[in-house]
Image (cartoon, grey):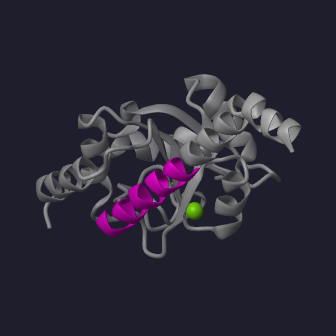
Amino acid sequence: MGEEKVKEEAMGIIGMFQVVPRLVVFDLDYTLWPFYCECRSKREMPSLYPHAKGILHALKDKGIDVAVASRSPSPDIANTFLEKLNIKSMFVAKEIFSSWSHKTDHFQRIHSRTGVPFNSMLFFDDEDRNIDAVSKMGVTGILVGNGVNLGALRQGLTKFSQNWNTSQKNKQKWISKFSQKPDASEKIDQK
Ligand SMILES: [Mg+2]
């Protein structure tokens, strides 16, 4: 499937959801591209997973920001590759640094830079320890097995809207619990 076709399909998928994330964050190695960039030379011409570019463009066209969170120890190679692939300027935030934490530091920085709350973010990564760590912060995370693709996008948006609906319901429950308090105490008094 060509890039334009992927973009068109991705736009269709995004359009099916009433609630969408404000920011979609991507890991680099084995999520956007099929290699560890620390093992490559800056002189090489890298390539992305086949659906990656079409998905990035579809998100941008739908007004959804994109960012990068990578624990790569070679940010210089990563940045060179993003530039060579003509996608570097698409990202509103790029946090590329090695860390002991499983990307919680990366997400704190992305949050400070963009102001987007964690529960309005969707994250794609190929390592479950990263997904687990940032899910605890409220980010919706999707583990990718073979790079980001249209299936992962659909799965991510589905999980995001489920998480969103659950949090809205809990908020409503909380609000009604407290707004009904005078009523509840009246009933208790009558007994
Ligand atoms: Mg990775």
State which quadrant residue 129 falls in.
bottom right
Q: Is residue 161 magenta?
A: yes
Magenta span: 150-166
Q: Left or right? Give the position of 126 relative to 186.
A: left
Looking at the picture, tell me which residue is in the foreground, 38 or 25. 25
| Residue 186 percent across, percent down from the top left | 80, 33
Q: Is residue 37 magenta?
A: no
- Residue at x-position 38% and y-position 30%: 89
Looking at the picture, tell me which residue is in the foreground, 18 or 49. 18
| Residue 23 percent across, percent down from the top left | 46, 38
Residue 123 to residue 87: above or below:
below
Residue 165 to residue 91: above or below:
below
Q: Does residue 138 appear in this view?
A: yes
- Residue at x-position 78% and y-position 49%: 99
Looking at the picture, tell me which residue is in the foreground, 98 or 113. 113
- Residue at x-position 58% and y-position 24%: 115
Residue reaching furthest to the front: 190
| Residue 50 percent across, percent down from the top left | 28, 65
Most prominent secondary structure in the magenta stretch? Answer: helix
Residue reaching furthest to the bottom: 145
Looking at the picture, tell me which residue is in the foreground, 44 or 56. 56
Q: Does residue 69 appear in this view?
A: no
Q: Left or right? Give the position of 31 relative to 179.
A: left
